[in-house]
Image: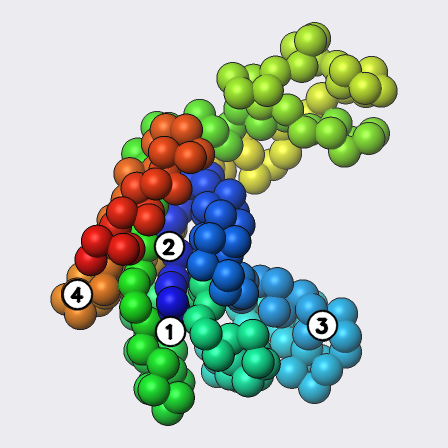
């Protein structure tokens, strides 16, 4: 099973990725994790990527694809994989398709988690963190006993900059602009499976399984 999972920030991709990895016994391949791992190990590709990252630039698609190709060469990918965080654009999708075609490994399904904007704003802007001990809370899903202090260490809770409502809405706007053409790309190829991403985790997992196995 070769899958790609798409979804905006806060849509639950991390949770569902873990479930799909275990259900289908396939490796979870995150482009962000590949970059961090390559940089941490000091590989040739990692060193090249680090130059861009240190200067605040995006890592070029060609370099990310080289890392993907390197990852696909590992034995655990022979029976499938789950891509998370890549592709993000049509150009990346086209390049990925060429890379996979050389191995005769077409994607089987592209899963898009659909969560409305207001729900995502609630999910992300409701997060609170404790700088002291690192514990995370959510004002709706996992609230602290006190509105302003950590249950564990008593430290003052903060809203991280990227969780502020205006920042969240801007991130969503960027995502929507970037990925709308990508969804059309996969829809035209009959690969797109849209799944409602609102509800209990197990229900969303069941919807994904139905979309994938019933296609």
Viewed as shown, does residue 55 lie left or right of 122?
right
Where in the figure is residue 146, as x and y percent of width and height?
70, 8
In the image, residue 161 above or below residue 103: above
Mark 4 is surrounded, within 10 Å at the Cα level, by few (under 14), some (14 to 19) or many (20 or more) other residues, namely few
Q: Is the residue under label 1 in contact with that under label 2 (CB below 8 Å)?
A: no
Q: CA distance from mark 4 to mark 3?
A: 36 Å
Mark 4 lies on a secondary structure that is loop
Image quarter of the C terminus: bottom left
Q: CA distance from mark 4 to mark 1?
A: 18 Å
Residue drawn at 56 percent across, 74 percent down: 76
| Residue at mark 2 | 6
| Residue at mark 1 | 92
Image quarter of the N terminus: bottom left
Viewed as shown, does residue 7 lie left or right of 134?
left
Mark 3 lies on a secondary structure that is helix
The earlier-in-sequence mark between 2 and 3 is: 2
The numbered disc on residue 190 is: 4
Closer mark to the observer between disc 4 and disc 3 = 4
């Amino acid at each position: 099973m070769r899958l790609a999972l798409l979804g905006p920030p806060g849509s639950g991709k991390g949770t569902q990725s873990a479930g799909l990895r275990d259900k289908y016994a396939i490796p979870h391949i995150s482009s962000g994790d590949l970059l961090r791992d390559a940089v941490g190990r000091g590989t040739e590709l990692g060193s090249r990527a680090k130059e861009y990252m240190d200067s605040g630039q995006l890592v070029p698609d060609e370099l990310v694809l080289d890392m993907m190709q390197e990852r696909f060469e590992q034995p655990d990918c022979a029976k499938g994989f789950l891509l998370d965080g890549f592709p993000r654009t049509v150009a990346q999708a086209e390049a990925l398709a060429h890379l996979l075609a050389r191995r005769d490994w077409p994607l089987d399904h592209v899963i898009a988690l659909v969560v409305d904007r207001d729900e995502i704003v609630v999910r992300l802007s409701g997060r609170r963190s404790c700088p002291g001990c690192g514990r995370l809370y959510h004002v709706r899903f996992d609230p602290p006993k006190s509105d302003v202090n950590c249950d564990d260490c008593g430290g003052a809770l903060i809203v991280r900059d990227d969780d502020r409502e205006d920042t969240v809405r801007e991130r969503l706007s960027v995502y929507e602009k970037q990925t709308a053409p990508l969804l059309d790309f996969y829809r035209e190829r009959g690969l797109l499976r849209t799944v409602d991403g609102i509800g209990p985790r197990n229900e969303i997992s069941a919807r994904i399984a139905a979309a994938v196995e019933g296609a």
